[in-house]
Amino acid sequence: MSGDDQQSKRHGTGGGAAQVARDVLTLEADALHQLADALPEDFGAAVDLILGTAGRVIVSGVGKSGHVGRKISATLASTGTPSYFVHAGEASHGDLGMITKGDVCLLMSNSGETPELSDEIAYCARFGIPMIGMSSKPSSTLMKAAQLRLTLPPVPEACPMGMAPTTSTTMMMALGDALAVALMRARGFEVAHYRDFHPGGKLGAQMSRVADLMHGQDSLPLVAPDMGMQETLLTMSAKNFGIAAVTDAGGTLFGIITDGDLRRNMDHLLESTAGAIATRKPVTVTPDTLAASALALMNEREISVLLVVDEGRRPVGVLHIHDCLRAGVA
């Protein structure tokens, strides 16, 4: 077999599969550009409606729209907008009870004529539950029933037969992301809020605060400026962090003694006091500092321990680099 034949075998018929991929990605990217250029007129009103909703955003659909709807609902819920997905088919068999008068429904169907949505549309109309429709057919049953309409541009599907939901579901997903991010911005949703919904795994670890990982007051190796170095060394050894925090009579941080300070003052160490050996204005962090930021600071300064101080620069804890590594912050 020639080299060209072997290459064709590896990459499909003359690299045709790769070209198909490029065509699909280009088509869907173009569709997103069209969506951005022709953002649905009701988008801002939809954000305002959801912000003013006392209940949840009920997202509903079937088929591929349903799969996308589940993801949109999950994104909303994890970014500060309470949301729940209701399968349109199951809604007709009891799940309509999951929808209350305080909710708003986001109903998704590319054609806008999905039969399974009919009972849900009727239910919302009967009980005055606001509906936001997402479809590419502005004159469809769904869009006529909805109070607000997120209309997708009429872009062909990437499927060569024009039947399999591809481009349409990409636009739905992206528009759902845009809705979630707009709501985040409007709510002032920040990292601290995000961590409340993502406490587990790598993401939770990255958003941990120093206060979550630090050793508290009982672990602090505190010494006074006039303490002799012999006693200071005993305190450092007992607390086992390789440092001593030197504080004044009011508890404010005066300085820090590290192993480096000990080596630099070896000749007259035992005749000195803690205040004479200490490095003034040491690097510190506050309890609300992100653990990831504290770890970056330790790496940058090539140190393994940070003192944690309050707004009055009084030591309240100590953070070791191993605490960050054990928590998976790295």
Image (cartoon, helix red, strand yellow):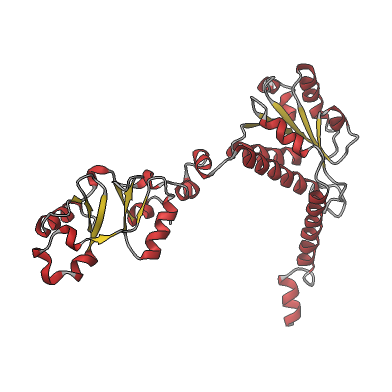
Quarter of the image with the N terminus in it: bottom right
Image coordinates of residue 31 in percent, x first then y, are: 81, 53
Image coordinates of residue 234 in percent, x first then y, are: 12, 55
Relative placement, left or right, of 139 versus 15 is: right
Res 329 visible: no
Residues 295 and 308: in front is 308
Q: Quadrant of residue 177?
A: top right
Residues 277 and 295: in front is 277
Relative placement, left or right, of 155 versus 220 is: right
Image coordinates of residue 149 in percent, x first then y, are: 82, 35
| In the depicted structure, whether residue 250 falls above or below residue 96 | below
Which residue is the extreme one toward the bottom? 2
Which residue is the extreme one toward the top? 126
Residue depicted at 57% across the width and 40% down the height: 189
| In the depicted structure, whether residue 318 falls above or below residue 263 | above
Res 84 visible: yes
Residue depicted at 34% across the width and 52% down the height: 323
Residue depicted at 73% across the width and 29% down the height: 105
Image coordinates of residue 300 in percent, x first then y, are: 40, 64
Residues 160 and 156: in front is 156
Quarter of the image with the C terminus in it: bottom left
Relative placement, left or right, of 81 versus 204 is: right
* Number of numbered discs on residues: 0
| In the depicted structure, whether residue 314 falls above or below residue 321 | above
